[in-house]
Amino acid sequence: MKEQEATPERFAVTGRNRLRRRHDRGHYDHEAVYAVLDAGFMCHVAYVIDGQPYCTPTIHWREDDWLYWHGSSASRMLRNLKGGTPVCLTVSHLDGLVLARSGFNHSANYRSAICFGTARIIDDPDEKAKALLGVVDRFYPGRAVELRRTHAQESKATMVIGMRIEEASAKVRAAGVGDDEEDYGHPVWAGVIPVQTVIGTAEPCPRLLPGMGKTAGLAGYRAGRRLDEALLEAQELYESETETAEPVS
Amino acid sequence: MKEQEATPERFAVTGRNRLRRRHDRGHYDHEAVYAVLDAGFMCHVAYVIDGQPYCTPTIHWREDDWLYWHGSSASRMLRNLKGGTPVCLTVSHLDGLVLARSGFNHSANYRSAICFGTARIIDDPDEKAKALLGVVDRFYPGRAVELRRTHAQESKATMVIGMRIEEASAKVRAAGVGDDEEDYGHPVWAGVIPVQTVIGTAEPCPRLLPGMGKTAGLAGYRAGRRLDEALLEAQELYESETETAEPVS
């Protein structure tokens, strides 16, 4: 894959996000990248302080080509950087262990998205208030309005960081064992051991008010379902409600 | 938590790994950090090239206080850095979604370990050969010897990166909803939606030789089991076999 300009459907391919290895597994279109991002609850954010890299797990959410996450130790640094700081935000899903007939051909099935951008503290009050409602509704459709309203000091104590995705790539392996042709006769078990992240049985708060059932917006998080499917569905619901509320003229 | 010297059981606490927020969730002892690392198949490695942070998902494995992983785009940079480069390697597990009665008290149950060190290419032939067997046996006890032997050019084509863990911390949240006292009367469902990463039914390679069943070392990866439990068990098996083979006098 050569370097390319961005198009309305695809991120630019540059020296920063171009895949060096396994081009066949790479994707640069928004759809592929968003599918990985939206299927995940947690991400890892890499940033640099005084030359030292940090890799912080946190919760992320997406609005179009913007990513948001909750403040981390990067926050201290960001306070002093009006222009923002370069970060790399990555979401990964493990889908299977791939056991081949040689050590070299062992692998994993996975989906990952790597996003580059410039992180900024979201401190505009309206933008921040919208983000704090958005993070609830994006995961739990329609929930924000049901909650006790956010106190001013809570909003102040919450750090929201955001960045526009400048460049990104997705990488996916979803295949069986790929052995060298001459190795298929080697006498050892080979195959894929699939892995899924699944939702368990909800544990209601012991102090729940009597008769307080789960609301319709939580129906997607049913026991036994794949978490990534529930998260993708919730994002779709969130986007369709946002569109209804704020039509783009 | 103040800064502290390392002890035989605990990593040093410094400005780099000290938890800034939620000290109550933090741990610096080897046991807590290793429990998170060993329960994971994938990690995220953060490193810096020309001031730009990168966050790369990859497979990691541990030998005592050393971490190893397969080469990534960092490899190109590392070739030119004889002294190694600072990295941060993080492993995270999502254990549950925590739905509170206010947006502010929404949270997640999780386990994470953040490790700092100086990454180096493992190019000593003996150390590299040992690592390439180790990565198979660490995940699949006893499997390396069953495989087609590694060709010299495969070993050459595989980049192994290693670092001693200089500093690390683990962070764990494993609790129910923590609402403000005055919010428990708010009429909304609250609770924990647990999440687990589980093993599915193995999919044998369609070209498996007749009668080629899974070997004893793969018994831990049975369908329905939690992946983290299987990985912890495999690491224990690996360590006990390594100790038998190479007694520390």
Image (tube, coloured by chain):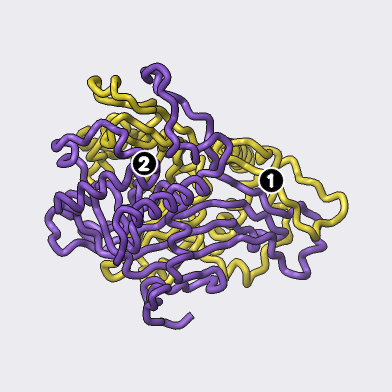
Chain colours: A yellow, B purple
Q: CA distance from mark 1 to mark 2?
A: 51 Å
Residue under label 2: B142
The percent position of residue A52, horizontal first and vertical second, equals: 29, 67
- Asked which secondary structure carries label 1, the reply is loop
Query: Residue at (69%, 58%) from the top-left corner?
Result: B100
| B34 relative to A136, above or below | below
Report whether residue A125 is seen. yes
Chain where mark 1 sits: A
In-image side of A19 versus B89 (left or right): left
Callout 2: helix, strand or loop? loop
Q: Are marks 1 and 2 on the same chain?
A: no
Q: Nearer the viewer, residue B126 or A246?
A: B126
Q: Residue at x 36, y 18 (%)?
A: B209
Residue A125 rendering spot, x and y as whole percentages: 55, 64
Q: Which residue occupies the foreground of this view, A60 or B95?
A: B95
Image quarter of the C terminus of chain A? top right
Q: What residue do we see at 24% from left, 20% from top?
A: A181
**Disc 1 target residue:** A142
Residue A233 x %, y %: 59, 36
Say which quarter of the image contains residue A133. bottom right
Name the residue rendered at 62%, 52% in the picture.
Answer: B97
Q: Is residue A88 visible?
A: no
Where residue A235 appears, as percent x and y from the top left, is 57, 40
- Eye-nearest disc, 1 or 2: 2
Q: Is residue A126 left or right of residue A118?
A: right
Name the subunit of mark 2.
Answer: B
Q: How many marks?
A: 2
Q: Amino acid at mark 2?
A: Gly
**Foreground residue among B145 and B84:** B145
Question: Which residue occupies the foreground of this view, B231 or A230?
Answer: B231
Q: Amino acid at mark 1?
A: Gly
